[in-house]
Image: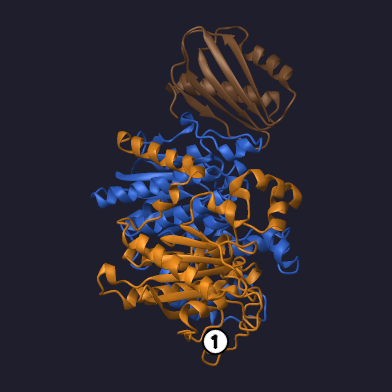
Amino acid sequence: MNIDELLQRDSFIERGARARAQALLDPGTCRELAGPFERLHSPWLAMQQLVTQADDGVVVAKGLLGGRPTVVLAIEGAFQGGSMGEIGGAKIAGALELAVRDNERGVPTQAVIVFETGGVRLQEANLGLAAIADIQSGIVALRRYRPVVGVSAGTVGCYGGMSIAAGLCSYFIMTREARLGLNGPQVIEQEAGVAEFDARQRGLIWSLTGGEQRVATHLADACVDDDTAAVRAAVADCFARGVPPVHRSDRAADFLACLAQVDTTQQATPDDVRRLYGKGLA
Amino acid sequence: MERLEYEFAAGQPARGRTVSGVVSSGDLEVLLEPAGAGRTTIAVQTSVDGYGATWQALLARVFGAGDLPAARIEINDNGATPGVVRMRIEQAYEQVNETGGGA
Amino acid sequence: MMDTAPHSTSHSTAHPASRGAMWLRLLTGGARPLHDWSTVRACDGILAGRPARYLAIVPDADNGFPRARNGEVGLVEGWRLAQAVRDVIDEDRDRAVQDKRPIVAIIDVPSQAYGRREEAYGIHQALAGAVAAYADARRAGHPVIGLIVGLAMSGAFLAHGYQANRLVALDDPDVAVHAMGKASAARVTLRSVEALEQLAARVPPMAYDIKSFASLGILHEVLRLTNLALPDEQDLALVHGALEAALADILSDPRRDLANRLQGAHRGASRRVRELLATQWEAAD
């Protein structure tokens, strides 16, 4: 982008979850469900004297996208790191379940999930984990009917159990700033030591798990500029492609064939992964 | 964590409902809904204890004139400065005045 | 009863902590694993007089990926689990729903594998492979039962067992379900381990022990055995009985989703959210 484009751009990253959901749906069609005025505050955070957000950090917005019935599940990364608690998780899972019910009745409702999350909210641990299992079940059920499109723009990225949910999506869109990985750098350093992963090495982190790398290695489908129109266009493009003939999560044989070629005595470099997956997963 | 409640004289009911801000560190969320004419109630949930007097003073500055649209306001605060609190309240009122709400 | 995996490089029969390997052996009568895989074992067994497929993750000190040698679910484990489950789906593809074979996930997984190689090669995607396979098996009509015999932690549990129709757990101090180990959880939440433990004592979803987990209403049954480390005939009968009861419960349930986990007192908010969404769903159009 040149300077004019940079000044004109409408950053998607800087938008909160509500504004992201509104931007993705066709103008005038966006209606929020189970919103902040329902006051679904987390009982578990309140029990620990932690301030709660009235929507528990998840926005459910229903409307049209390109004229098609669509529900957007947008996670607010600024609240508790976008972590999944009982209520926020139930909003996503419940909406996916209703989208499945729509399709069973002949209404082709599709879903977008905006992942800005570190995974399970540890203050709700097992209820967050259970909710993520429900979300994963919902994605697998819905994606047979209509694509489930995942987006991660940053700055939180997509980690923990929700990165597994991301891996279930029909398509996954990232920006360069976003990261997609299972374990955060801090956790790997804690569990495996600083030689395995130095959590302060930002270059290392993005080179392995950033949007560009994930797209180059076929673990994500599009890397877009941080621009709302670009994100919206990429989402629409994915829906237009329809349900993929084979989901990425169903390519066990291809992935195992690639992994069999890994020299496990060496650490992995970004180029190693590009070489292997670039060929084996094309 | 502390809960505080306030009440101020107000004008006609606000024209809609809206939400502004997020409960991130140093920020707050403001929920604004119409209330009966003449009275605004404010329920504050805040992560920082012992600042009741500061809240009272700040809210008195914002609502003390008694002519803002009557609203039921809920504030979920995570350690915002008074300046940020005021900004989010004003943002909420702007949002209801512009579009009649929309959350 | 010895494991007889063909030319196995696994030393897991010598590994003292592998309850997963032990229970797989006990429940299948020592059946040979179907593949030459060291950490993912799929065996044919019997459940309620019918053929069933049993799956377990076991440790291998010589595993290729160095961060997946203690029973963790790593890259290869995730994808092989996916393959093992999809094999069952494919083999039973032409059978009527009531004839789809049960799949029993024997769960003893300390965590997902933590490592640079894992992140580089997309362990999140490998685990997604297993999740999708188990979920598809359940939706195709296979009764999927998870039996927690040790640890059921975070991503590893999501991949291996958490998509089951029913979950059964053994009642023992070494049996635990959680989203993150204590040391890491303390670091991430900027608290001491002691402070976390104190919180867990009064916030049920934060606790690690199986009784607290049971109070969330997600488990179908919790089993008290006489000797968890060396189960006797009675213990084995108890476990078989519980698996059979879970199977019967699944077969009598017209729903093959995870809705049966939402009944507990501690999941009231989960139910309320769904009710609210359903009420507002149609009105929004």
User: Is residue A52 at least partly visible in the picture?
Assistant: yes
> Whole-percent x and y of residue C228?
60, 70
* Residue identified by numbered label 1: C3
Q: Colour of chain C?
A: orange
User: Is residue A156 at least partly visible in the picture?
Assistant: no
Q: Is residue A23 above or below residue C124?
A: above
- Is C66 left, or right, of A167 in this rendering? right
Q: Nearer the viewer, residue A156 or A39?
A: A39
The residue lying at 63 percent from left, 9 percent from top is B64
- Is C257 left, or right, of A50 in this rendering? left
> Whole-percent x and y of residue A193?
75, 66
Q: Colour of chain B?
A: brown
Q: Quadrant of residue B2?
A: top right
> Whole-percent x and y of residue A261?
55, 83
- Residue sticking out furthest to the front: C234
Subunit of label 1: C
Q: Nearer the viewer, residue A133 or B74?
A: A133
Q: Amino acid at mark 1?
A: Asp
Q: Which chain is blue?
A: A
The residue lying at 62 percent from left, 18 percent from top is B5
> Whole-percent x and y of residue C41?
50, 79
* Mark 1: secondary structure: loop
- Residue sticking out furthest to the bottom: C7
Q: Is residue A57 above or below residue C70?
A: above
- Is A200 left, or right, of A99 in this rendering? right
